[in-house]
Image (cartoon, grey):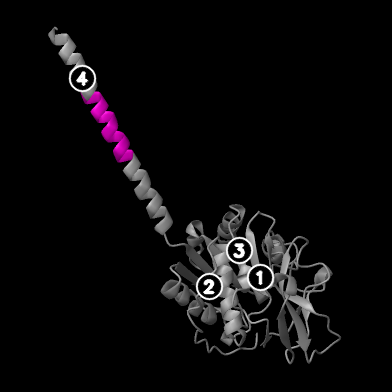
Amino acid sequence: MNANFFNERFSFSAFALFVSTLLIATSALTVAQTKSSKNKKPLVVFVTGDHEYSGEETLPIIAAELEKNYGMRTIFLKSSPDHNSEKNIPGLEALKDADLAVFYLRWRQLPKDQLALIDEYLKKGKPVMGFRTTTHAFNFPKGDESEKWNAFGEFALNSPPGWGGAAKHTHYGHNSSTDVTVIPEQAKNPILTGVAPSFHARSWLYRVLPDYPVKGSTWLLMGKSVNPDKAAIDNPVAWTGTNSFGGKVFMTTLGHPEDFRQEAFQRLVINAIHWELGQKVPKQWKGKMDIEVPYREAK
């Protein structure tokens, strides 16, 4: 045998060893990346700004609980310089990396660059959660170039498109409250795991019927007004669905600070966040949170 034969054999063996090593390294990297992806904590971004319900005080307690006991990362954003400031919520760039956006807004008039960041998030079809006054998150004047955002409740959360209007979205008076019950057909819905079949909420009932939540939404909880200031009908107070961008929705018209003191409501919120993220709802409840935040009259 000549030298060329040995050289060819040696070259082939070296090449085979190189390929084998490369495949092993690539496989190890893929496994590491998969594990890293699985181990990555989901990011929940809270966006708050309301004149009335102290969302910038109640929701940070929820955020801290998610980080402490449920393996999540959170970023908390609020109106600046205070809750009555309607035209600035710094830090909305965080939505670029968010796995879930949670909104508690009331009648904001954000600048176009901030609206664009919310719009970008929604158009990705990512999940959205909303509380109470987020049905009327924005309040731009008629004819304003951002007026379409007044319908945020409808296109993002399957709720009425703003306060009043053709939907006649209203409530039953500040002196009323709400008896809440689980809708029987949804008793086994994972979001309702561990949620009491009935509880009392301080929130005065919002009227969203007859046209909302939008068709195709799933009603979870029903509310009955207690001591209403006008003839009242029962209305859904929590629902899920898919919004106009294809994103998962959880919306509740509850959200008075005293509601957050209720263990049933706390568990509903924690469960819904897991559901929105595509995670299993925790069967093991970590315990009631201490949420003692006062209500303030809107200015």
For image coordinates 62% across by 81% down, the residue present is 51
Give the residue type at disc 2: Lys
Instruction: Report the residue marked by disc 1.
Output: 188
Identify the element where label 4 is drawn: helix
For image coordinates 77% across by 86% down, the residue present is 225
Q: Is residue 121 left or right of residue 142?
A: left
Instruction: Report the residue marked by disc 4.
Output: 11
Q: Earlier in the sequence, mark 3 or mark 2?
A: 3
Where residue 98 appears, as percent x and y from the top left, is: 50, 60
Where residue 255 appears, as percent x and y from the top left, is: 63, 80
Gap between marks 4 and 3 measured at Cα? 58 Å
The answer to whether 1 is drawn above or below residue 119 in the figure is above
Give the residue type at disc 3: Val
Gap between marks 3 and 1 measured at Cα? 22 Å
Q: Quadrant of residue 7?
A: top left
Give the magenta-colored segment's residue range.
14-26
The C terminus - image quarter = bottom right
The answer to whether 81 is drawn above or below residue 294 in the figure is above
Identify the element where label 1 is drawn: loop
Q: Is residue 23 rendered magenta in the image?
A: yes
Residue 130 can be seen, yes or no: yes
Residue 87 can be seen, yes or no: no
Instruction: Report the residue marked by disc 2.
Output: 283
On residue 128, the disc is: 3
Specify the principal SS of the magenta part. Answer: helix
Gap between marks 3 and 2 measured at Cα? 23 Å
Give the residue type at disc 1: Lys
For image coordinates 32% across by 35% down, the residue present is 23
Gap between marks 1 and 4 measured at Cα? 65 Å
